[in-house]
Image (cartoon, helix red, strand yellow):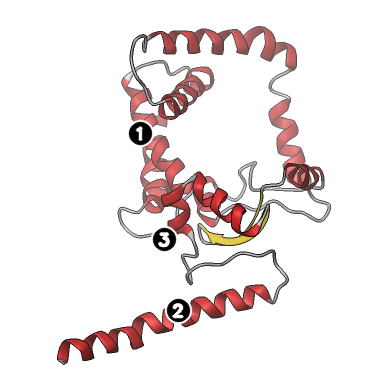
Amino acid sequence: MEVLDIGLIFVLSVILPILILRRINNVMRDKKRLPPGTMGWPLVGETFDFMKQGPDFMNNRRKRYGDLFKTHMLGSPTVICMDPDLNKQILNSENKGFIPGYPPSMRDILGEWNIAAVHGPSHKSMRGALLSLVSPPMIRDQLMPKIDGFMRSFLAGFGGQVVDIQAKTKEMALLSALKQIAGIDGDPLAESLKTELYKLAAGTISLPINLPSTNYRLGKGKGGQHVEENDR
């Protein structure tokens, strides 16, 4: 009897309020005339489902709600569009009604002034400055041959092996960038930076919860500190 009473008290005091908050959360969002979908649990939304299911998260909700649906992930209410034509229209209408947004964790870790987070005249100015550093002939005649040579050398080391294509592609892209941008080529520093940059990347797609050992904490603090130390 005591066990039953404890279980009932737990349900009434913890589980029931959470379920009520989740329902209120969805109802309030529905009143704002958003696309169909669910906002998930309070605070965390559907982040855990998104991280666990990967691409299946998008596909399952697309089957249920259509090409345009709402959710709540990575600390932000989010509208997902999987219609190619509508996505093209949105991209072409940037700063004309649509303003791109990114998860709080990405802004916190990469900074509010990274090129992906700014928009309007600031974005145009930053993009122009970056594009001025490289020209199409430079990319074709100098950069692409170097990248091609690096990729061939990288892939040659896996002859006759079974490899994880996704993992190796990510590694190849990172090591190629380190070589072309910073001149770091296959030394312990490259391996060390690779580990820390992976932590930083994981932090940008995590819940912005600043607790020890979370991806957010590791991405925001430890990765950046390591890069600064190596820069000295």
Whether residue 232 is visible here, answered yes or no, is no
First reached walking from the N terminus: tag 1 or tag 3 = 1
Q: Position of residue 44 (x, y in %)?
A: 46, 65
Task: Please say if the residues under marks 2 and 1 sit with CB atoms less than 8 Å apart.
Answer: no
Q: Position of residue 13 (x, y in %)?
A: 34, 87
Name the residue nearer the viewer: 211 or 54.
Answer: 54
Judging by the rendered image, the residue that carries numbered circle 2 is: 19
Residue 70: quadrant of the picture: bottom right
Mark 3 residue type? Ile
Disc 2 on helix, strand or loop?
helix
Q: Identify the secondary structure beneath mark 1.
A: helix
| Residue 184: x %, y % from top left | 43, 19
> Relative to 118, is 9 on the left or the right?
left
Q: Quadrant of the N terminus?
A: bottom left
Pick out the residue farthest to the front: 63
Q: Position of residue 36 (x, y in %)?
A: 66, 65
Q: CA distance from mark 3 to mark 2?
A: 22 Å
* Above or below: residue 82 compared with residue 61: above
Q: CA distance from mark 2 to mark 1?
A: 39 Å
Residue at x 58%, y 61% (from the top left corner): 71
The label on residue 110 is: none
Amino acid type, residue under disc 2 in the picture = Leu
Lateral position of residue 133 relative to residue 194, left or right: right
Residue bearing mark 3: 209
Residue 87, quarter of the rendered image: top right
User: The C terminus lies in which quarter of the figure?
Assistant: top left
> If you read the primary sequence from the N terminus, does the residue marked by circle 2 or circle 1 appear first?
2
User: Mark 1, residues whose alpha carbon is within 10 Å: few (<14), some, or many (≥20)?
Assistant: few
Q: CA distance from mark 1 to mark 3?
A: 21 Å
The residue where tag 1 is placed is 195
